[in-house]
Amino acid sequence: MTIEACDFKGKKVIVRVDFNVPLDENGKVTDETRIKGALPTLKKVLNDGGSVIMMSHMGKPKGKVNPKLSLSQIVSNVSNNLGVDVKFAPDCANAQAEADALKSGEALLLENLRFYPEEEGKPVGIDKADPQYEEAKKAMKTRQKKFAKKLASYADLYVNDAFGTAHRKHASTAVIADYFDENSKMLGFLMEKEVNAIDNVLKNAKHPFTAIIGGSKVSSKLGVLKNLIDKVDNLIIGGGMGFTFFKAQGGSIGNSLHEDELMPEALNVLRTAVEKGVNVYLSVATVAGNRFSNDADQQIFETHRIPDGWEGMDASPASLAIWKEVILSSKTILWNGPVGVFEFENFAKGTGEIAKYVAQATQNGAYSLVGGGDSVAAVNKFGLADKVSYVSTGGGAMLEAIEGKVLPGVAAIKGEN
Ligand code: AMP
């Protein structure tokens, strides 16, 4: 079932949203982006004449009630955005009465799901090394099913619109789907957009397909590199992670960030790229600083000849000129990770340029997906978020998706593929 095709008239609909919004020390919401992201789905249900039961987690209360992480603090924000007075159920596992009382066009928000350990389904208070752990895990899985069944009992239909937690097999993101038949569960609009964006690059990419992978560590991007190497024509490797590749090839990288233990993997990636005919574009020269600071002295070195006392902190004009040509001749672009320490104004130029090239390629007709971690902050910083095809909201979930992993939250509704 698709949300567009569904008529919610007279139905009670439980929607897993991602209202894990940042709060200040007084419990005031400081950024409503995630609330706004769920509005198309919530409004569709209400406009059709259904009633909506919203459920979410906030923070990491680790299975215990924690007033600082109570979703009661966001009720007025949700009400204002939705345009209806949202009711609140202070115990998500005992909200039958509130759910039963809901009338068409009304909305109810359940308290933080993670006040119950059943939501995440991990046994609490027992160490993994404990011989009783497996037993405790099994018992918790049974409790998780019961918890999910309870949540399901509040509603006729289930919608998952929380892409940010789609990589977790939690009660509200995956297990609950077992209690609804195929025609009674669906992805929300935000989830659909994310899933379509991933399919556009991983399944239906137009070629040439270029991935720009940056960021700090090879270790956190290895899965991404391994999955993409089968799919892309061009692989641009930038940022701090690039230096591990240079060191592995025998270059001098000065004080640049690197992971010695990842050097064999880096060489593997390069070898596989040659086998598969993928063009790899490492940086040719690097803007280095004499210390890790915005005010550091700057000098440009060839990336394999950085002297001691200097560390690579941004992409150089020479690298950018090559990358620009590759990006502008691409039909599909996936960008994950900045190509320099973009948080420092004086080392943000390279990342800003990449954002511009991706925007320009998009204007010329390429499909571009920016996602997974800091690259999102980068396109926002340079004001180019609306000039790329899609900016993913789900950091960890997007990363796992581009690693080629099945997302439990999506699989629970759409099946394994
Ligand atoms: P990630 O979360 O892995 O995408 O990494 C993002 C982080 O990588 C940002 O905080 C950047 O400052 C950092 N980064 C990018 N390039 C470098 C570099 N050359 N040296 C140190 N950190 C870097």
Image (spheres, rainbow, N blue to C red):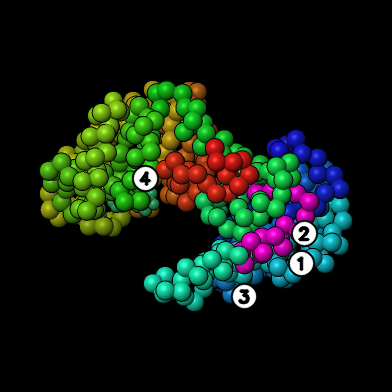
* Badge 4: residue crowd in 10 Å (few <14, some 14–19, many ≥20): some
Quadrant (top left, top right, bottom left, bottom right) of the C terminus: top right
| 218 lies left or right of 404 | left
Which one is earlier in the sequence, the residue at label 3 or at label 4?
Answer: 3
Report the magenta stretch's main SS: helix
Identify the residue position indicated by label 1 in the image. 95
Contact check, label 1 and label 2, Cβ < 8 Å: yes
Give the vertical position of 266 relative to 366 (above or below): below
Image disc number at residue 65: 3
Give the vertical position of 118 relative to 379 (above or below): below
Identify the amino acid type marked 4: Gly
Magenta residues span 143-160
| 321 lies left or right of 115 | left
- Tell me residue 392's x, y (percent): 52, 43
Q: How many angstroms separate mark 3 from mark 4 (CA)?
A: 36 Å
Q: Residue at x 82, y 67 (%)?
A: 97
Identify the amino acid type marked 1: Ala
Image disc number at residue 223: 4
Residue 276: say if magenta.
Answer: no
- Tell me residue 176's x, y (percent): 66, 55
Q: How many angstroms separate mark 4 from mark 2 (CA)?
A: 39 Å
Identify the amino acid type marked 3: Val
Image disc number at residue 154: 2
